[in-house]
Amino acid sequence: MSAKPLLGPCDSYQLEPFAYEWAWAMARAQENNNWAPEEIAVAPDVADYKNPAVDPKFKHLFESVMAQLTTFDIERGDDAAETFLSVFQPAEIRHFFKRLVWEEGLHTRSYRYVIENLGIPLSIYDTWKTVPAMKERVEMAQKLSEPVLQTIKRQIEGRPYHEMSIAEKQALLRSLVFWFLIFEGVWFWVSLLGPIQQLSRLGFFKGGAEQFSYIARDESNHIGFGVALIREFMAQYPEALTEELLADIDRDTRRAIELEQGYISYCFKDGPILGYSSPDHVATTKFFANMRLGSVGLPQPFEDAYHAFPWMSEQMELKKEKNFFETRVTEYQAGGALSFDDQEEGSSTEQQNPYATCFTANKPAAETPPPLAPVADKQLVEELFPEEDPYFGRHQQPEWDDPLAGLKR
Ligand SMILES: [Fe+2]
Ligand SMILES: [Fe+2]
C-alpha cells in the first residue's frame, strides 16, 4: 500500500513527499494550457447565426450541442468538487481536481461567451430540462454520484474514508469510470469533436469549433488523469473489482450509448448534414467507449463499433496549432503592421490610428519583438506524460483522438 493511500489515512494538508508525481505533473501541464474565451473569433459565427440563408438544420445542431454542453460542464465541475475532491485524500490528487473544477467553470464561461455574442435566446439554458434526451443524461450522471455522497455524509458523521465498505468502494470506482471514461471520454468528447467540427469543415460556426478545440484539449488531460487515477484505485483496492461491478459498468456503458442515440437523434431531428449521420455518430461513440474502458483494462463491450470520423484528430491538430501557437503571434504581428503600414508619409501614427499608439509610441521598428517560436506538440505531451512515470513510460501519442493509447499495457 502506498504511503499516501488514495482513501487515506494521510495528511491532506501535507503536499510533499509526493506519492503520485504524475498528478502533480499533469496539473502543471494544465497550467501551460491557459486560454480565455475572449481569444476566440466569433464574428463568423454571428454572421452564420443571423444569416437566414444558412440551413436551419445547422443552427439547430449548433444550439443543441451548446445547450447540452452548458449543462454538462456545470454538472461536471460541481460534481467533482462535491464528491471526488472530498473523497481522495493525497494533496497532489486533490490539487489536480481543483484545477479540473476551475477549468469546467472556464468552459461554462466560454459557452456563455459564444451564446451571448450570437444572441442565442436565454431559453437555451432551459433546454436540458425540456428535451428528455438531454435530461436523462444529466440525471444518469447525478444518480451515479448519489452513493458517493452518502459515503461523504458518513465521513462527516465521523467514519473516515479508509473504513469504507467494499460496496462503497465499488460505487466510487463505478462513479470514477462513468465520469472520466464515459461522461468526459465518450459523451463529451464525441459531441465536441464530431458534429461541431463537421459544421466547421462545411464552413459554418468556425468560432464554435475553435472554442471546442481549446476545451477538448483540457478534456483530453482530464481523461488522461482519470485513467491514471482509476488504475491506481484498482491497484490499491482490488477487492472492489468484482464480477458484479463489471456487470454494473457494462450496463452503465450500454445505457450511456442508448442515451447518446436519443441525444444525437434530437440534434439531427431534421435529417443528417453532409458527411455526418446519427448511425455513424453512435458507432463512433461505441468505438470510444471500447477504447476508454480498454485503457484501464476493463472489457470492451461493443463489437459493432467503428470510428467513422478519422478527420476528428486532424481537426484538433489544425485548430490547436493555429489557436495556441500561431494566432496570437500573427495577430500581434498584424497589429504591428497596421501601426506602420497604414502610416502615410509625413503623418503621425497618432493622427492615423489612436489605438496604434499603445503599441508603437516611442518604439523604433527595430525593437519589434521577433515572432515567438512555435511550441512543439511533443513538448506538451512530454510534460503531460513524463517519462519517469510508470504509467506513461512508453507514451508515444501522435493523435489527440486517442490520448490514452500509450496507457494500454
Ligand atoms: Fe469541460
Ligand atoms: Fe472535463
Image: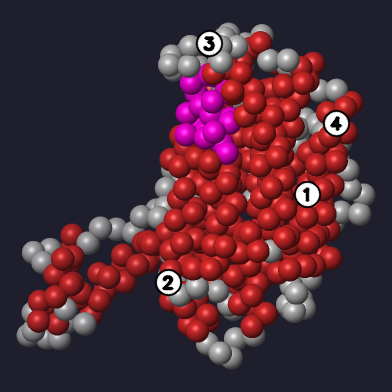
**Upstream in the sequence, badge 2 or badge 3?**
3
Q: What's the CA distance linking mark 3 and mark 4?
A: 29 Å
Mark 3 residue element: loop
In magenta stretch: residue 95: yes
Q: Can you tell me whether the CB of the residue at mark 3 lies under 8 Å from the nearest atom of ligand 2?
A: no
Tell me the SS state at disc 1: helix
Determine the secondary structure under disc 2.
helix
Residue 386, horizontal then vertical, whole percent:
56, 31
Task: In the rendered structure, find residue 10 and report the number of the disc placed on it.
Answer: 3
Extent of the magenta region: 79-98
Cα gap from disc 4 to disc 2, whole angstroms: 45 Å
The structure residue drawn at horizontal position 52% and vertical position 80%, both measured from the top left corner, is: 49
Using the image, determine if residue 224 lies above or below residue 170.
Answer: below
Q: What residue does disc 1 label?
A: 256
Q: Mark 2 points at which residue?
A: 117
Asked if the residue under mark 1 is in contact with the one under mark 4, i.e. CB atoms within 8 Å, the reply is: no
Q: Quadrant of residue 290?
A: top right
In terms of secondary structure, where does tag 4 sit? helix
Which residue occupies the foreground of this view, 24 or 13? Answer: 13
Q: Which amino acid does label 1 sit on?
A: Ala
Q: Residues within 10 Å of mark 2 (few under 14, many from 20)?
A: few
Residue 215 horizontal side relative to residue 252, left or right: left
| Residue 381 visible in the current orientation | no
Residue projecting furthest to the right: 303
- Residue drawn at (42%, 59%), measured in percent from left and top? 37
Q: How crowded is mark 4: few (under 14 residues within 10 Å), some or many (20 or more)?
A: some
